[in-house]
Amino acid sequence: MKLCRFEDEKGQARIGCLQDNSSILDLTAAGIRQMESLLESDDCLTRLNQLTESSPRIAASKARLLAPVEKQEIWAAGVTYLRSKKARMDESEFSATAYDRVYDAERPELFFKSLPEKVVPTGECVGIRRDARWSVPEPELALVLNSRGAVVGYTIGNDMSSRDIEGENLLYLPQAKVYQGSCALGPWIRLGASEAAAREWKIRLEIRRNNEAVFTGETSVGQIKRKFDELAGFLFRSQSFPHGAVLLTGTGVVPPDTFTLQERDVVQIEITGIGVLRNSVTVV
Ligand code: DO4
Ligand code: MG
């Protein structure tokens, strides 16, 4: 099942359940005002099945998808794939040992990524910093966690990053990672998949420029070094998230070091089992 937030023709935000690619069941018409009430429920799928029987169906073409996030903070894990460790070590002599160590350490790298209201939905523009020379998307599986830290769903995340800023000095990481348009999530939340099933999914990145693919790459969720519960467990250590949280799980697809994003590029991230998150790029 796929849960979404969408804007109706009057500009009102509503909650929906994607039926097929052409229609959405309007759960708000059946009384659901927030995804949180479903994500917090112990029998989310049963409740959804009951609700969908009484929900009106609307054409997906009449709905503008919103980011599938409400009051959750968005966090991200780093250096969870071997490919990411190698890329970071190559970009920075200064910080190479830090990346090498964190890949094998018990404690993962976790960093704050975005407030929910700043998240970019599918179809809108992600940002590249005007003071960065080397900008890349990072296609990542995002875990949707409830307030108890349990994985209740999955969405697609883009952890946009300024690699020259991050590579210059590790202390610049927040500026390389957190700026206008640096986090996209969507298009919806996939519910009811186990970690074992999610580990079979492929993550594909395609970057298009003037209608031509200028980079394509692929990895598998199964390449993530750490278990989902392990990442969620560290995030929830000594910290509570009353509305739940979204946790990006790191990137395993890295364009070559000669590649940087440009204004009007289109970044398309597919995770089999979820869908496609598509955003064009603007300078911020
Ligand atoms: O420490 C740098 C960030 C790592 C990251 O974002 C990733 O591996 O995806
Ligand atoms: Mg990342």
Image (cartoon, rainbow, N blue to C red):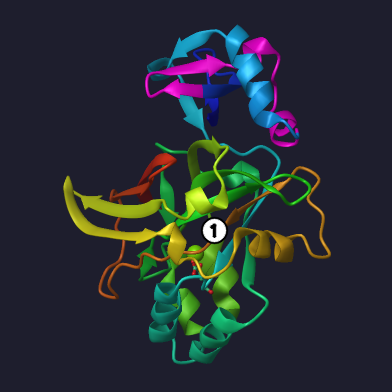
Packing grade of label 1 (10 A; few <14, some 14-19, many >=20) is some
Q: Quadrant of residue 162?
A: bottom left
- The residue stretch that appears in magenta: 18-41
Secondary structure beneath dot 1 equals loop
Label 1 CB-ligand 1 distance < 8 A: no
Residue 21, position as x, y percentages in the image: 38, 24
Task: Compare residues 120 and 233 and report the one nearer the observer.
Answer: 233
- Establish if 147 lies above or below 26: below
Q: Determine whether, in the image, residue 145 is placed left or right of residue 5.
A: right
Q: Residue 24 lies in magenta, yes or no?
A: yes
User: Closest to the observer: 176 or 45?
Assistant: 45
Name the residue carrying label 1: 179
Residue depicted at 46% across the width and 25% down the height: 64
Residue 284 in view (yes/no): no
* 96 in the magenta segment: no
Question: Which residue is drawn at the image coordinates 56% and 73% (left, top)?
Answer: 173
Residue 172, percent across and down? 56, 76
Residue 160 as seen in the image, left or right of residue 102: left
What x and y, as percent, mark residue 113? 60, 58
Find the residue positioned furthest to the front.
196
| Residue type indicated by callout 1 | Tyr
